[in-house]
Image (spheres, rainbow, N blue to C red):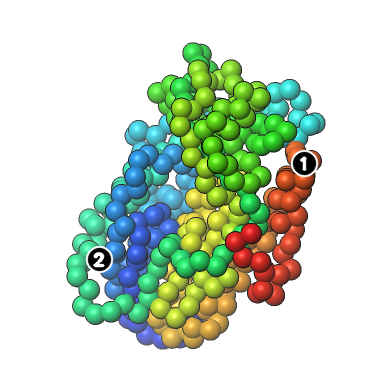
C-alpha cells in the first residue's frame, strides 16, 4: 500500500502550502513527513483526546512508528508477551497461546508526545498562516463511506482477578460475539466485544457476554460502564479531491479483529505525504488521486476478504452471515456505486 507515487521531474525546491487539521497519529505523521521534505505546513490541532485511549501495538506497528519518528517505547507503557486465541469450534477449550510481544499505550498520550516533538523541531508549523492553504490533510472526512456490515464494538475497563495473567492478551468466541481482553497494567484490563449490530444497552450486554465466555474468571467483575462504537470496515470512495486529502479512519477503517488499525492509519499518512509531495513537484492531480484511491481500495478489498473468511469459521447465526456477506460484496466498490453506510 505504501508504494511510491510516480513523480514528475521538477525543481527539488517546490513546496506545497498544507494545513493539517487534527491531532491523530495519521495527521501528525503526515505533517512530520511533509515538514521533513521542506513543505510549508500549518498544524491546526483539534486538542487532546478526552480520556485515555488504550492502543495495542504489535512489533510491526512499533517498528513502523520507530522508522517514522525514531521513537523508543514510552516508559509508562505495559508490555505483553503472548496472545491466546480461541477462534471457532475446533479451537479446543483454551485455544492456542502464542508468543506475540506487544505494548499497550495510551493513544492520547502518544499523540501528545508526537505533537511535542513536532513543536520542538518545527515551531513555525504552529504560527499563523501567511495565506490560504492549497491542501488540507484531515481524518474528519465528509459522510458517504462505503461500510461493510453493521457490527459494533462494546468496550469497557474492569479490574483483573487476583493472580490473573497480566502479560497475555486473550481472544475468545461465544455464540453471539468475539471478546478480547487486554491487560493494561496496574491490575486493570480493557474488555471488548464485537457484536453483529448496534446495542442500546452496551453495559448490560457486555456483562452478559462476559458471563457466557471463558474470560469471566479473569476479571473481578464486568465493566461498570461501557460504550458501543460502530466498528465495521469502511472506506471513503473519494479520499482525494482538489484541496483535501483524507488520512486515517477518515479514509479507511479496519475491523478491530485485524489488530492492524494503527499501522494502517500510519500507512495512509505515508502515502498522503508522498502524494502531496509529488503534486508539489508537478505531478498532475488526476493520476496522483487515482493512485492514492486505488491503493486504499486494494488494501480494503484484501481486508474484507480476510473478514469474509474468518467470521464464518466462528459464527453461524443469520446476523453474522449478514456480516460475512457484506464483506463479500466487493464488486459495487470496484464500480464506484456501492451501498453506503450499510
Apparent side of residue 26 relative to residue 212 in the rendered image (left or right) = left
Residue 125 got which mark? 2
Q: Which corner quadrant of the image does residue 199 belong to?
A: top right
Identity of the residue drawn at 22% across and 73% down:
129
Identity of the residue drawn at 79% across and 41% down:
316
Identity of the residue drawn at 68% across and 33% down:
173
Residue 116 placed where, x, y %?
26, 51
Q: Using the image, determine if residue 159 lies above or below residue 229.
A: above
Residue 164 placed where, x, y %?
53, 18
Residue 200 got which mark? none
Q: Which corner quadrant of the image does residue 238 belong to?
A: bottom right
In this figure, which residue is indicated by the disc labeled 1? 317
Q: Earlier in the sequence, mark 1 or mark 2?
A: 2
Kindly indicate whether the residue at mark 2 contacts the one at mark 1 (C-beta within 8 angstroms): no
Identity of the residue drawn at 54% across and 37% down:
201
Quarter of the picture holding the N terminus: bottom right
Residue 269 in view here: no
Q: Using the image, determine if residue 154 lies above or below residue 98.
A: below
Amino acid at each position: 500500500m505504501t508504494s511510491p507515487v510516480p513523480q514528475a521531474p521538477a525543481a527539488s525546491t517546490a513546496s506545497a502550502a498544507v494545513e493539517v487539521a487534527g491531532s491523530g497519529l495519521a495527521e501528525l505523521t503526515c505533517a512530520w513527513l511533509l515538514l521533513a521534505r521542506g513543505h510549508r505546513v500549518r498544524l491546526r490541532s483539534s486538542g487532546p483526546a478526552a480520556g485515555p485511549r488504550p492502543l495495542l501495538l504489535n512489533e510491526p506497528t512499533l517498528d513502523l512508528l520507530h522508522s517514522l519518528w525514531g521513537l523508543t517505547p514510552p516508559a509508562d507503557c505495559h508490555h505483553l508477551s503472548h496472545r491466546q486465541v480461541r477462534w471457532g469450534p475446533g479451537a479446543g477449550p483454551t485455544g492456542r497461546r502464542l508468543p506475540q510481544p506487544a505494548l499497550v499505550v495510551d493513544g492520547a498520550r502518544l499523540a501528545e508526545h508526537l505533537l511535542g516533538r513536532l513543536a520542538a523541531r518545527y515551531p513555525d508549523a504552529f504560527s499563523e498562516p501567511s495565506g490560504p492553504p492549497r491542501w488540507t490533510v484531515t481524518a474528519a472526512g465528509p459522510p458517504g463511506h462505503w461500510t461493510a456490515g453493521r457490527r459494533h464494538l462494546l468496550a469497557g475497563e474492569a479490574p483483573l482477578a487476583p493472580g490473573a495473567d497480566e502479560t497475555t492478551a486473550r481472544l475468545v468466541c461465544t455464540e453471539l460475539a468475539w471478546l478480547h481482553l487486554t491487560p493494561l497494567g496496574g491490575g486493570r484490563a480493557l474488555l471488548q466485544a464485537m457484536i453483529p449490530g448496534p446495542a442500546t444497552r452496551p453495559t448490560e450486554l457486555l456483562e452478559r457476554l462476559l458471563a457466557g465466555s471463558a474470560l469471566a474468571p479473569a476479571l473481578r467483575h464486568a465493566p461498570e460502564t461501557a460504550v458501543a462504537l460502530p466498528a465495521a470496515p469502511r472506506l471513503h470512495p473519494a479520499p482525494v479531491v482538489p484541496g483535501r486529502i483524507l488520512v486515517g479512519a477518515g479514509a479507511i477503517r479496519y475491523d478491530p479483529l485485524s489488530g492492524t488499525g494503527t499501522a494502517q492509519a500510519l500507512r495512509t499518512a505515508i502515502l498522503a505525504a508522498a502524494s502531496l509531495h509529488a503534486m508539489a513537484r508537478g505531478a498532475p492531480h488526476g493520476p496522483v488521486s487515482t493512485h492514492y484511491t486505488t491503493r486504499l481500495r486494494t488494501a480494503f478489498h484484501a481486508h474484507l476478504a480476510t473478514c469474509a473468511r474468518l467470521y464464518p469459521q466462528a459464527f453461524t447465526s443469520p446476523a453474522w452471515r449478514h456480516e460475512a456477506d457484506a464483506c463479500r460484496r466487493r464488486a459495487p466498490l470496484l464500480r464506484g456505486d456501492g451501498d453506503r453506510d450499510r
